[in-house]
Amino acid sequence: MRRSAQSSGFNRWSGMRLLAAGAGQVWLEIAIREDQTQHHGFVHGGIVGALADTACSWAAATVAGDVVTSTYTVQFHAPANTALLRARATVIKQGKRNVSAEAQLFAVDEDGAERRVATALALIATVGAAARGGAS
């Protein structure tokens, strides 16, 4: 999964780091740069959303193999005004063609304390011959 993660140009650009993955769960983080913030200095919502999307899809990949995001929603609870953003995602339910996953996103302060800043729900589609209706 680490090799796959680093093969994505977006993941390399954003600086996403895989901390742990397995059994329907993933932990990721991003060390936030100035070019990933918005006009108030908070982490841009697009970065928060991208981390949520990636965390949910990678959690799904731990149980379903190759996947792509079908849809996701993000609820922002508080501004992420931090140098480190962390996501923990968990598979809620695995079906034949889709996996439901949830991610919690946290601003992490210098002392390591976490403050939840967003929650995401995602529907992740499986990819491959079985998902396309072909032979497995």
Image: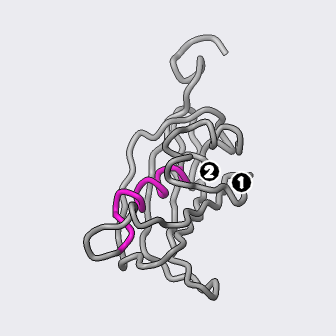
Give the residue pinned by disc 1.
Answer: 21
Task: Please report whichever mark, 1 or 2, sits nearer to the chain's N-terminal start.
Answer: 1
Q: Which residue occupies 63% across, 43% down? A: 5
Q: Amino acid at mark 2?
A: Ala
Q: Which residue occupies 60% across, 45% down? A: 60
Q: Is residue 94 above or below residue 17?
A: above
Disc 1 is placed on an element classified as strand
Q: How is the image coloured?
A: one colour
**Which range is magenta?**
42-56
The C terminus appears in which quarter of the rendering? top right
Q: Amino acid at mark 1?
A: Ala
Give the residue pinned by disc 2.
Answer: 59
Sort mark 2 into few (<14), some (14-19) or many (20+) by Cα contacts within 10 Å. many
Q: Which mark is residue 104?
A: none
Sort mark 1 into few (<14), some (14-19) or many (20+) by Cα contacts within 10 Å. many
Q: Quadrant of residue 134?
A: top right
Farthest residue toward the front?
34
Q: Nearer the viewer, residue 3 or 121?
A: 3
Q: Residue 105 in the image: x percent, y percent?
A: 50, 69
Q: Are marks 1 and 2 in contact (CB under 8 Å)?
A: yes
Farthest residue toward the left?
39
> Disc 1 to disc 2, how far (Cα)?
7 Å
